[in-house]
Image (tube, rainbow, N blue to C red):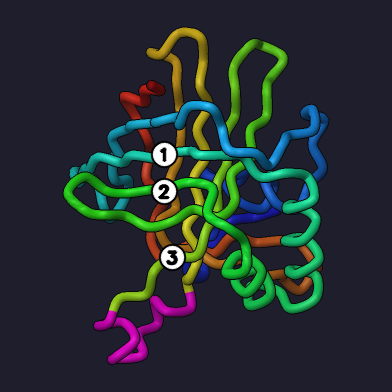
Amino acid sequence: MRIVKKAIVATAAVGIISVALLMSSTSSAQENAKLPKSIYIQAQAMGQSTQLGQTFGVTVIIEQFSTAADQKVLLDAFNAKQNEGLVNALTKMSSKGRISITGTLGYEVTYIRKFPQPDGSTKIRLVTNRPITFGEAWTDSRSMDYNLSGMEVILNPDDKKNTGTLAPACKLKMDKENQLQLELLQNEWKLVDIRQR
């Protein structure tokens, strides 16, 4: 699998969305029930490459986790209609939480999976439809094609070792060799100072 930004192959965020949706996991079954207590994950997003020097705060509130059945729905939708099918399927799913940038109301997240790791860490992946702004719709901007947002965080027992990446605007597509590609509108953002509470 490759991530493509414009015509250049990038490698930093290979696992954000495609692995979360389109590869099976050995994690235990997850109940699609509301968590007894919401999980809050806060981080600082740091720009890379063309966004170098830019930062902003990110907060994710997890109310419940998606199930393997949800994963299959998205996989089937993508296989049927590619990115458009995935967007439509996400639209029909119920909210599992919210993601927001500091100072904004944010938006709903409809797919969140948790994957316990052998080393005791926990990998959390999310994908959701990205809200399209009025300006984008009015001008029919190219950015409207990048209608998904994705994020991956790895939470360790030692908070100082937490890592993550954020792709605020992206889409999925297949290349000529039928390999999945995550195409980014801009570079992915590195997440630092990640804390769970």
Q: Which type of secondary structure does the marked residue at label 2 adopt?
A: strand
Location of mark 2 (residue): 98
Task: Give the CA separation, mark 3 to mark 1.
Answer: 16 Å
Q: Which x, y percent locates residue 99?
A: 38, 48
Marks 2 and 3 close (CB-CB < 8 Å): no
Q: Nearer the viewer, residue 101 or 160?
A: 101
Q: The C terminus appears in which quarter of the rendering?
A: top left
Using the rendered image of the protein, determine whether residue 34 is visible from the camera's viewpoint.
Answer: yes
Q: Is residue 81 left or right of residue 143?
A: right
Q: Nearer the viewer, mark 3 or mark 1?
A: 1
Task: Give the CA separation, mark 2 to mark 3.
Answer: 12 Å
Q: Vertical placement of 105 versus 102: above or below?
A: below
Q: Residue furthest top?
A: 158
x 72%, y 36%: residue? 31
Q: Which x, y percent locates residue 113?
A: 63, 40
Q: Nearer the viewer, residue 71 or 5?
A: 71
Location of mark 1 (residue): 61
Q: Vertical placement of 121 versus 175: above or below?
A: above
Magenta segment boundaries in residue numbering: 134-145
Location of mark 3 (residue): 130
Marks 2 and 1 close (CB-CB < 8 Å): yes
Q: Nearer the viewer, mark 2 or mark 3?
A: 2
Of callouts 2 and 1, which one flags the residue occurring earlier in the amino acid sequence? 1
What residue type is disc 3 on? Arg
What residue type is disc 2 on? Arg
Of callouts 2 and 3, which one flags the residue occurring earlier in the amino acid sequence? 2
